[in-house]
Amino acid sequence: MPRDYYEILGVSRSCDHGSLKKAHRKLARQYHPDINKGPNAQQRFNEIQEAYDVLSDDKKRQLYDQFGHAGGGASTSPPPGGPFGADDGGGFDFRVDGGPGGAAEIFEQFFGGAGRRGGGPRRPQVGRDIEQKIDIPFDFAVQGGALKVKQHGGSTQTIEVKIPKGIAHGAKLRVRGKGQVGPNNTGPGDLILQIHIAAHPYFRRQGNDLFIDVPISVVEAVSGTSIDVPTLTGTATVTIPPGTAGGRKLRLKGAGVEDARGRRGDLFTVITIDVPPDLSATDRRSFQELADRLPPARRNVAWNQP
């Protein structure tokens, strides 16, 4: 017999949705096959997902609580002859208790009448999901908030969607019940929004970290300096040490993007050296005199060793 879904997730039969979600998240991280390389991790992960899929859905959970695996399994494709694999209903006659909320009504909602004696063609439980890309500004993705989205597919309508702060490019948001309505007016599917974040004029984002190119002069690179750089909330002063080379990254801790879980990245200033192309002859001679006194720049590279 399959294991009890409540036992799999380690929760009581009276647990609320919050406790259920917390238990699922913990176990899914523990047994995810990308993290856990144990021989039974994939099987355990699938078992956890199946249990959560049933118990997190109020109707499926009600069915499972009444009839166990025979009634509340995650699969919505019952074998021939009804959900119990036998033409006689597996010992259960769901023509009895036909009142509102009874077994016959519940099974008809899930299997389109297949739970009764003799079975029959199964109606889809819900309509088709709709996938749609949406473009959002860089600053809006960082801050999050309510956004009006024009939903396409089926009937076009404008809905309001809550964008979590710090959402990543390519993330997907599922909006329940905003997909296509199923045949015979069964429940609608979901709207799945794929997030596309517009580029920023000067920030580049990697995860929760931000990067910004900061040009400095040759003199500033040699002597060092302090400069103000933009951040998400204003400006910050960055100290350029003497002898700073191009490509060096200087970190401003905690000045990156904060996501919905409170995790905050850093801001990295990437130094570039600005060499003026129109130096005078006098300036060039001065640089050449300096170069003659300095050690060769390529003295330590591997391909220039004797």
Image (tube, helix red, strand yellow):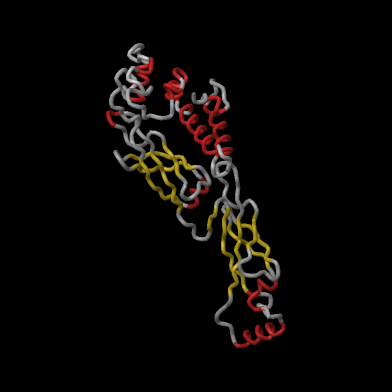
Q: Is residue 189 left or right of residue 280?
A: left
Viewer-closest of 42 and 113: 42
Q: Residue 256's spot in the image, x, y percent?
A: 59, 52
Q: Is residue 302 left or right of residue 210?
A: right
Query: What residue is rendered at 45% in x and 22% in y?
Result: 64
Viewer-closest of 181 and 32: 32
Query: What residue is rendered at 45% in x and 17% in y?
Result: 66
Q: Residue 306's spot in the image, x, y percent?
A: 68, 81
Viewer-closest of 188 and 265: 188
Residue 162, relative to residue 206: is it above or below?
above
**Residue 242 seen anywhere in this rendered image of the structure:** yes
Residue 16, relative to residue 218: is it above or below?
above
Quadrant of res 150: top left
Query: What residue is rendered at 30% in x and 28% in y?
Result: 123
Viewer-closest of 3 and 87: 87
Q: Residue 139's spot in the image, x, y percent?
A: 50, 51
Quadrant of res 159: top left
